[in-house]
């Protein structure tokens, strides 16, 4: 019985080790996008007619963390299918919470031929002293009819 348990433990260890090795082979390639500093991002924000922020976060993240007054919200999973929505006459900034998904988005946009300044993180920007626009949901309407 002890041998059976020992053999099972050894087999499980080998199986988990092989699964981990397979995952390592599938790691994502590092982004080539520039991660913008707060100063670089602020400089770009002084030219609102020349830039467009592509925010790839979920709506709840934008609501909870905050963001910027004007942006185009396209979640990262939908970005490749929404490229036709994005104007090509502006410099793009890809935004996420800490520039991880933003960097992925910047790579996608660059490969699709867009002019991309880089990626930024909303939370990183705020931690560096920047101010985010906080979105406050409206209070419930007491006169609304319940269905």
Image (tube, helix red, strand yellow):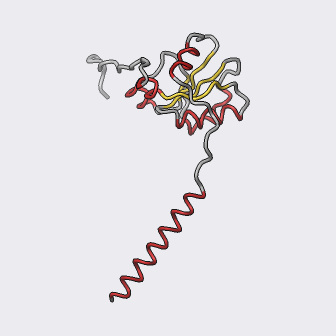
Residue 138 placement: quadrant: top left
Considering only vertical position in the picture, is 60 above or below 140?
A: below
Q: Quadrant of the C terminus?
A: top left
Residue 50 placement: quadrant: top right
Does the image show residue 40? yes
Question: Which residue is outermost to the right?
Answer: 113
Q: Residue at x 53, y 68 (%)?
A: 18
Horizontal arrangement in the rendering, residue 4 relative to residue 122 (left or right): left
Count of numbered tags? 0
At which x and y percent is residue 117?
63, 24
Q: Residue at x 29, y 20 (%)?
A: 140
Frontmost residue, 127 versus 131: 127
Residue 110 placement: quadrant: top right
At which x and y percent is residue 28?
59, 48
Q: Residue at x 66, y 32 (%)?
A: 109
Considering only vertical position in the picture, is 79 above or below 125?
A: below
Q: Quadrant of the N terminus?
A: bottom left
Horizontal arrangement in the rendering, residue 50 relative to residue 38 (left or right): right
Frontmost residue, 75 versus 102: 102
Q: Residue at x 70, y 21 (%)?
A: 88
Frontmost residue, 131 versus 87: 131
């Amino acid at each position: 019985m002890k041998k059976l348990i020992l053999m099972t433990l050894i087999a499980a260890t080998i199986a988990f080790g092989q699964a981990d090795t397979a995952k390592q082979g599938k790691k994502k390639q590092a982004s080539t996008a520039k991660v913008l500093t707060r100063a670089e991002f602020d400089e770009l924000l002084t030219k609102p007619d020349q830039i467009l922020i592509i925010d790839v976060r979920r709506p709840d993240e934008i609501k909870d963390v905050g963001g910027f007054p004007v942006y185009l919200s396209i979640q990262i999973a939908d970005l490749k299918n929404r490229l036709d929505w994005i104007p090509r006459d502006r410099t793009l900034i890809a935004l996420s919470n800490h520039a991880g998904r933003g960097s992925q988005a910047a790579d996608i946009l660059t490969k699709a031929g867009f002019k991309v300044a880089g990626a930024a993180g909303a939370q990183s920007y705020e931690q560096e002293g920047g101010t985010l626009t906080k979105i406050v949901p409206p209070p419930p309407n007491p006169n609304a009819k319940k269905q």
